Amino acid sequence: MEKDFSLDTYQDLVEEIKRSGFKILTLKEYFRKNGDASQFVILRHDVDRRPHNALKMALLESSFEIKSTYYFRVSKGTFARDIVEEIAGLGHEIGYHYEVVDKAHGYMRLARDIFEKDLRELRKVTEICTVCMHGNPLSHWDNGDFWKHFSLSQFDLLGEAYISVRDQDIYYTTDTGRGWNRMEYNLKDTFPHSSISLLPSLSTTWHLIDLIRRKQFQKIYLQTHPNRWSWWWLQWYRQMGEDLLLNWMKVLLAYYHKRK
């Protein structure tokens, strides 16, 4: 049997989305009002680390003639220019996965300078129309707070993957915590003010595949972290260990903040 959170299982998920007839959108397409279809899936990938995993995922999607959005951090080991170029060359959208409030330790003027610098670097490689905050669970800063001080139009951006989506009839699901909407392990991948609905918590990708097959929900916003989706056994076990450790750290952090 296939292991969950393997590239083979992701292929099963993509095949079901394609087979079920959902229109598949990038964030750029959604913000440009292509989200008027009665049934669609927004596909978003946050490339936190291991960019080679993102490339394998992008190649798989392209084999099904699917385009999705890949948000890259501009950090050592993640911003691999050749990989960004190759994924963009496949027709996928590239976006900026910003963490500037963390980098600037809460100083907003410095955060703006870092944002502009990182955005320029990415735009040397490809068009950048949308951005998405990186939610570091170990940081007490919230990168989404950047937009309390600045606007998207200042940076010639179309939208932000959290704050710009406010349609209650779209249902969001994320693989944060090595499950689907396992909110006890999700400290930062959330939407402001319940501006979007959530799919029910699902323990496996096969449950998600079945939900898509039954078309219980018509508009789905699906977010993954490519580093979580492995293609060989040693990598799979290493990632599972990392996920379990991080989940325990999140539980301890949540308990600590609750006691404060």
Image (cartoon, grey):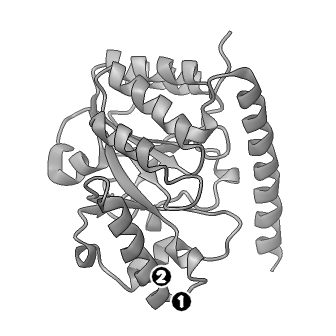
Residue neighbourhood size for the residue with mark 1, other residues' Cα within 10 Å, grouped as few (<14), some (14–19), many (≥20): few
Give the CA distance from mark 2 to mark 1: 6 Å
| Residue at (74, 43) in percent of width and height | 243
Say the numbered circle drawn on residue 175: none
The N terminus is located in which quarter? top right
Look at 56% across and 82% down and name the residue there: 104
The quarter holding residue 6 reads top right
Q: Nearer the viewer, residue 10 or 60?
A: 60
Residue type pointed to by label 1: Tyr
Residue 171 percent location from the top left of the image: 41, 44
Q: Residue under label 2, please give it.
A: 111
Q: Residue 124's image quarter?
A: bottom left
> Could you tell me which secondary element the residue under label 1 belongs to?
loop
Residue furthest toward the top? 1
Q: On residue 107, which mark appears?
A: 1
State the residue in front, 187 or 115: 115
Q: Is residue 118 above or below residue 22?
A: below
**In the image, 32: left or right of 241?**
left
